[in-house]
Image (spheres, helix red, strand yellow):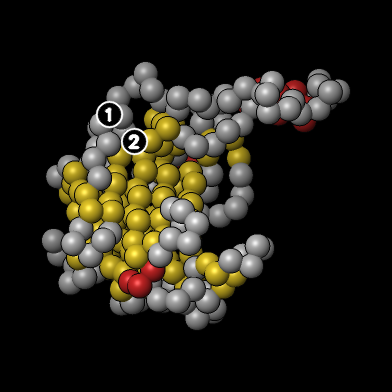
Amino acid sequence: MKKTNFIIGLVATGILSATIIAADHIDAPSTSGTTADIADFFAFEPSEGSDNTVFAVDLQSNVLPDLAFGTFDENVLTEINIDTDGDLVEDLVIQAIPRDGRMFFFGPVTPSQTGLNSQVMVDEPLGDVEISGATAIVNTTSSGVSLFAGPRQDPFFFDFFQFNAVIGGLAPEGFLPASDAEDTFDGANTLSIVVEIPNSLLGTPTATNALGIPVYRTWVTTNNRQ
């Protein structure tokens, strides 16, 4: 695999929108229905007090259960960016790019350049895993890193029709309690990239969340081949 320049196509943000078929966070119409379209990004510890961190990136949120599973675009590089000194510039990246039915991971490593351009850090392999179909495949490396790539059910719970009724003034009762609400996107899929990695490979967290728990400042980008 040669070093290839990529340019950022999307950045995961906190802006939320919805479509009739899935939760979605589309930033540019040209990415709709592709794996450059970031739907959700999660970073969490798998259990309380764990020494690992899980990064989960959901892409292409319109993969419906009655359609064939989507495929990862080999021209799209996904990067998990980690800021370790508080300046909101990536100090470490974990990269994922598909080739011939497998997802290859690189890092965590200091990027050769920050900002709009990226290169695949081929000299820093983290591991690879077969891209899953209906059956999940997870590869755990000798360094204790677990890797997954493939379809997963969209985790976004949203009563889309009640939401439209509320904002349209047609539901004076307002939003329904959880016991009565319907998950409009139940059964819809995303294409997911998941990395569980020991914190020892990331360094000490330099931020705290609202609960006072140490966390990493992290965000995800998708990058299109130039």
- Side (left or right) of 220 relative to 160: left
- Side (left or right) of 146 relative to 47: left
The residue positioned farthest toward the right in the image shown: 172
Label count reads 2
Q: Of 144 and 60, which appears nearest the observer?
A: 144
Question: Element at badge 2?
Answer: strand
Question: Element at badge 1?
Answer: loop
Percent position of residue 211, x then y? 65, 62
Percent position of residue 21, x then y? 51, 26
Q: Residue at x 73, y 27 (%)?
A: 177
Q: Residues within 10 Å of mark 1 (few under 14, many from 20)?
A: few
Residue 97 — which label?
none
Q: Residue at x 52, y 76 (%)?
A: 206
Q: Quadrant of the N terminus?
A: bottom left
Identified by mark 2, the residue type is Pro
Residue 151 — which label?
2
- Side (left or right) of 59 relative to 74: right
Name the image quarter holding residue 79: bottom left
Q: Is residue 215 above or below residue 223?
A: below
Q: Residue at x 68, y 24 (%)?
A: 179
Q: Of 80 and 179, which appears nearest the observer?
A: 179
Q: Is residue 57 above or below residue 198?
A: above
Mark 1 sits on what residue?
Answer: 134
Q: Residue at x 25, y 31 (%)?
A: 135
Distance from Cα at disc 2 to Cα at disc 1: 7 Å
Q: Quadrant of the C terminus?
A: bottom left
Identified by mark 1, the residue type is Ala
The residue positioned farthest toward the front in the image shown: 49
Cβ atoms at labels 2 and 1 below 8 Å apart: yes
Q: Of 111 and 143, which appears nearest the observer?
A: 143
